[in-house]
Amino acid sequence: MTEQTPTGSGVLATIGATPIVELVKLDPESPFRTFAKLESHNPGGSIKDRSALEMLRERIRDGRLVPGRSVVIESSSGNLGIGLAQVCGYYGIRFICVVDPRTNKDNIAIMRALGAQVEVVTDVDPATGEYLPVRIRRVRELVATIDHAYCPDQYSNPLNPQAHRTTVREIVRALPDIDYLFCATSSCGTLRGCAEYIRTHQLPVTIVAVDALGSAIFGPAVGWRMIPGHGASVRPKLYRSDLADIVVRVDDLDAIVACRRLAAREAILVGGSSGAVVAGLEQMRDQIRPGATCAMVFPDRGERYLDTIYDDDWVMTYFGDVSHLWTKPDMEVAPC
């Protein structure tokens, strides 16, 4: 199920119109239908491609961002950085991304391969114990000292959620009878864009926001958050209390188990935020009426998590032997 919607030129024209697939093996006894929007099919590998293009496109078109002169500077845990590196690389605009030690090394390598400069902050904010406030402060310092610098500021830019009105429109067109929409939260761009579209068109869709237990978006953080790209240590300015009808919070182990189960049963390799969405759906299972249609937004792909989520030694180190949570005896393959 795809919708062709040109959003730019060259490779940028392939952003959006991502496929939707029905998940029939994840929970064969489910009394409702479940679909996944695979944002990994964007050229940069994540839903953040949409935000990156939307936040830069008009400034490029009207000449406020000029190749060879302008500098785009942003804070990112990885996926938005890749999206911005792709857009800036295509148009020949210098890009600096500020990340922290939790950023996946493959994401950093991809950004650099696309021509971005990557700066890693190593200090944590003394008030929160998190990297995000430090990243944001460093971006402000760079913007103040570099000529012709521009920060898209994904955490407050209204063009971020605007990009996702197209995301949810694609979902609604493919699934006109949708009853529930599950979205992971970070900058709140996807959640807000989807919610605004659904409310504007008065669609009877229950919006479920999935957040990390270690996130401060929907309440005090509970414990440490190891998986990047899901949740936030500081409530984003795009947040509004009425965005979600239901909020579900999951811990890192919930997300990891869901990722591994999805790979084992549906042969779909996704990132941690997608696993969190699956875990959120599982928490809601008994509250969803039989026959309902549920859609989940899967933000990114799993190849960038091969040395964490999909690495048995890494999982064993931090969570112990939990493989029984995603492997069943009847799924074992006999030796050749």
Image: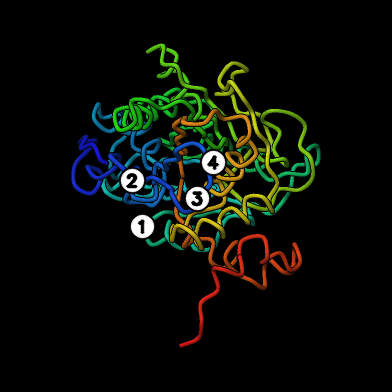
Q: Which mark is residue 28?
A: 3
Image quadrant for the N terminus? top left
95 w.r.t. 241: above or below: below
Spatial CA span between label 4 and label 3: 52 Å
- Taking depth in this image into account, of 216 and 71 the one nearest to the observer is 216
Res. 5 image quadrant: top left
Residue designated by label 1: 114
Q: Amino acid at mark 2?
A: Cys
In primary-sequence order, the first of circles 4 and 3 is 3
Q: Which mark is residue 282?
A: none
Are circles 3 and 1 on residues that touch, CB within 8 Å?
no
Residue 108 can be seen in this image: no
Q: Amino acid at mark 4?
A: Leu
In primary-sequence order, the first of circles 1 and 2 is 2
The percent coordinates of residue 182 (x first, y second) are 52, 34
Q: Residue at x 28, y 33 (%)?
A: 60
Query: Which mark's residue is nearer the viewer, 3 or 1?
Result: 3
Spatial CA span between label 2 and label 4: 17 Å
**How many badges with numbers are in the image?**
4
The percent coordinates of residue 7 (x first, y second) are 24, 35
Image quadrant for the C terminus? bottom left
Q: Amino acid at mark 3?
A: Pro
In primary-sequence order, the first of circles 3 and 1 is 3
Res. 216 image quadrant: top right
Q: Residue at x 65, y 41 (%)?
A: 132
Residue designated by label 2: 88
Query: Which mark's residue is nearer the viewer, 2 or 4?
Result: 2
Residue 208 can be seen in this image: yes
Q: Which mark is residue 142?
A: 4
